Image: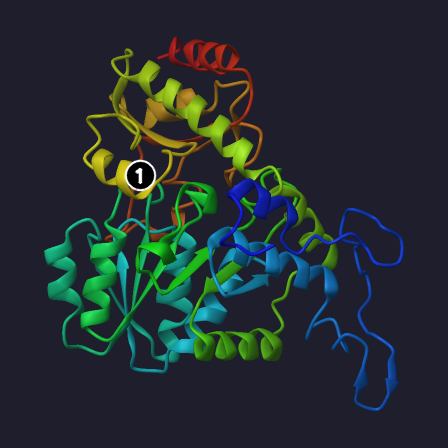
Amino acid sequence: MTETTHGFETRAIHAGQEPDAATGAVNVPIHQSSTFAQDAIGALRGGYEYGRAGNPTRDALQEQLAAIEGARHAFSFSSGLAAEDALIRALLEPGDRIVIGDDVYGGTYRLIDRVLGSWGVRHQVVDMSDLEAVRETVTGDSTAIVWVETPSNPMMTISDIAGLAAIAHEAGARLVVDNTFASPYLQNPLALGADIVVHSTTKYIGGHSDVIGGAVMLDDDAAAERIRFVQFAVGAVSAPLDAFLTMRGIKTLGVRMDRHSANAQAIAEWLQGRQGVEAVHYPGLPDHPGHELAAAQMRGFGGMLTVSFAGGAAAARTVAESTRLFTLAESLGGVESLVNHPAQMTHASVQGTELAVGDDLLRFSVGLESLPDLIADLEQALSRL
């Protein structure tokens, strides 16, 4: 099987998942070993010598990741931020610049600003949905990477991947797309011209809130070798059990994303006009400024939505602390529904910067529960306003 001859669900279930040769087990074994016996000095069985350099379970996951994103290369990391860190250090040198969106995940900004900034990597923030502003920012100042999230976290901004790729390439830069919110089921940035895709596999790809991980996918052979070296040299690899759990999640990604999207669409429509709700930010709504673009470059609108409350921070807190099925917690993309107050939780690290988010916002990760139950939960929480 190849990634070009089968549909997404078939690739998700079968890529890298051949039955075990010794036992016929249909699931890839968890090779819980830190080292591997050698038949002679330098004579490795299957190329394996030490767990940091390679592990059969992790290799199976990487083949599966490459297949679902439509990439030649995929690397599985111990977290999404570890994946981003290795990618940047592999491809950039001190003095290079990253142009990032003004609505990226707070942890990504913290990594680029406070960790890699002291290493000499510069950054500039721009509205990625404004192609002319991006063009003006990228041109002529050692820009090595243009970094975008679409849909963005938490404002659900939609950016034109093909347009950004053209601008980046004209300037001699690479376009990196954080595809976590969409997942490979709903969006494939490489097919739209992006150079590299990153994911927090903790989220939709894992899908069950029981594993931490990250991934980098790309086609460029030379860049892949540099990333491979940094991963080996620094060691932020996924453990065998984490790789196994992530593979398990991928096999149901398609059906889960269909349900996430359907539930989120219905809830977004239900929330519009409700007492106390100022605005609903969801690309599936026709009045969302990125609706038409999202419909063109995605195959669905996803399970994430953000709500602004007319009563400000107090109203947002009241709703967040009153839901019963929507659990107040960090993260997203699991089978269960979550609610998060970005200003004090996922984006607390960017308060006081140009990426700060309003304290009137709540971000909802809509899960797979029965839709009437989720709406009833939100109704009783809103009734407290």
Res 122 → quadrant: bottom left
Q: Say which quadrant the N terminus sits in.
A: bottom right
Relative placement, left or right, of 38 versus 134 is right
Position in image of residue 281 (x %, y %): 28, 30
Residue for point 24% across, 34% down = 291
Residue for point 52% across, 27% down = 367
Foreground residue, 233 or 172?
172
Kindly state the secondary structure of the residue where label 1 is placed. Answer: loop
Q: Residues within 10 Å of mark 1 (few under 14, many from 20)?
A: many
Q: Is residue 239 visible?
A: no
Using the image, determine if residue 68 lies above or below residue 292. Answer: below
Position in image of residue 55 (x %, y %): 73, 67
Position in image of residue 348 (x %, y %): 39, 47
Using the image, determine if residue 163 lies above or below residue 172. Answer: above
Q: Is residue 303 visible?
A: yes
Residue for point 23% across, 67% down = 168
Q: How many marks?
A: 1
Q: Say which quadrant the C terminus sits in.
A: top left
Position in image of residue 57 (x %, y %): 72, 59
Using the image, determine if residue 244 lies above or below residue 216. Answer: above
Res 51 → quadrant: bottom right
Using the image, determine if residue 374 lies above or below residue 359. Answer: above
In the orientation shown, which residue stands out farthest toward the front? Answer: 5
Residue for point 51% across, 43% down = 7
Q: Amino acid at mark 1?
A: Met
Residue under label 1: 156
Relative placement, left or right, of 186 versus 43 is left
